[in-house]
Image (cartoon, rainbow, N blue to C red):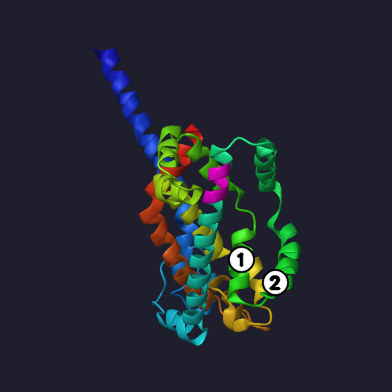
């Protein structure tokens, strides 16, 4: 009896220590975000003079007003939404189609294509910027919103293709064969049967692409050198960097505004993210 009680006490203390360790790790993980929120409500000198303190002496809400109106972040927000939505739609379509072909059809060179797609994970994004700019310039889209969308949609979405390919491999072939016997075309089978079944993967790819396009900096920066009116939120942060000084509170407020849609999307879509990755891993 005494041995059982001692074991129960050890288990209880083990659970408490584990919970405390996890809480500490969570605090370390979210602290930069909390510091950003705090900095967005402080005065310029207060940000660095108070060290790690998160409580502002007096909340400076005008930092958000300055970021939204004076620095033009309302316009940058609209550009970011249009670019992000266009990129997500294009990426989902081409990843789903490519993944469907790779996952359902066995043809010569299929394994080689999958290997090449896997190898693209180790290619730095900066190495692809020159061919992307050249191709977009040849199409006459450099310095346009469509150019940014095409560049982001085409700049390495191998993970999405492989996720779809893995998911479609697990779908029973009888569904597809029954539709083909009834006279359905390739695109009818894809859009009316296969793509709706891949809802969790579509949600996962959409969220990942949303995060990528929303936070992308290099491609929007290169494409908007001569067109400041097309800048996105990430590039618009440069408006707070002056020749002699930097508006740190304004930049923190702008960064907080740009993060709000991302955090909101994550809270609503985290279940689909887990389901999509779990389905791909099982395959």
Residue 97 magenta-highlighted: yes
In front: label 2 or label 1? 2
Earlier along the polypeptide chain: callout 2 or callout 1? 2
- Which residue sits at x=53%, y=70%? 83
Residue beneath disc 1: 150
Q: Secondary structure at mark 2?
A: loop
**x and y percent of residue 113 in the render?**
67, 42
- Which residue sits at x=42%, y=66%? 260
Q: Is residue 281 above or below residue 47?
A: above
Q: Is residue 70 above or below residue 151?
A: below
Residue beneath disc 2: 139
Q: Is residue 139 left or right of residue 253?
A: right
Q: Are marks 2 and 1 in contact (CB under 8 Å)?
A: yes
**x and y percent of residue 173 in the render?**
45, 33
- Which residue sits at x=71%, y=50%? 123
Q: Gap in Å between the C-alphas at discs 2 and 1?
A: 11 Å
Does residue 252 appear anywhere in the picture? no
User: Circle 1: is it few (<14), some (14-19), or many (20+) Cα within 10 Å?
Assistant: some
User: Circle 2: is it few (<14), some (14-19), or many (20+) Cα within 10 Å?
Assistant: few
- Figure quadrant of residue 156: bottom right
Number of marks in the image? 2
């Amino acid at each position: 009896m005494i041995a059982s009680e001692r074991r129960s006490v050890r288990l209880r203390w083990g659970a408490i220590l584990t919970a405390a360790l996890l809480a500490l790790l969570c605090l370390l993980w979210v602290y930069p975000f909390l510091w950003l929120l705090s900095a967005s409500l402080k005065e310029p000198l207060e940000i660095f003079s108070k060290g790690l303190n998160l409580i502002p002496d007096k909340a400076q809400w005008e930092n958000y007003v300055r970021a939204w109106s004076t620095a033009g972040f309302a316009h940058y927000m609209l550009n970011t939404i249009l670019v992000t939505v266009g990129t997500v739609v294009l990426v989902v379509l081409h990843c789903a189609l490519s993944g469907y072909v790779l996952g359902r059809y066995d043809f010569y060179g299929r394994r080689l294509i999958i290997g090449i797609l896997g190898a693209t994970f180790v290619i730095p994004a900066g190495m692809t910027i020159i061919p992307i700019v050249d191709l977009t310039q040849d199409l006459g889209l450099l310095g346009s919103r469509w150019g940014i969308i095409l560049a982001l949609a085409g700049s390495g979405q191998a993970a999405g293709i492989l996720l779809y390919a893995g998911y479609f491999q697990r779908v029973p072939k009888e569904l597809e064969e029954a539709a083909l016997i009834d006279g359905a075309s390739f695109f009818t089978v894809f859009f009316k049967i296969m793509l709706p079944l891949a809802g969790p993967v579509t949600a996962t790819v959409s969220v990942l692409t949303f995060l990528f396009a929303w936070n992308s900096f290099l491609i929007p920066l290169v494409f908007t050198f001569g067109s400041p009116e097309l800048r996105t939120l990430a590039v618009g942060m440069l408006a707070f960097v002056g020749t002699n000084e930097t508006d740190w509170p304004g930049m923190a407020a702008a960064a907080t505004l740009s993060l709000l849609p991302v955090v909101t999307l994550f809270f609503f879509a985290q279940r689909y993210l887990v389901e999509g990755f779990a389905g791909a891993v099982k395959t």
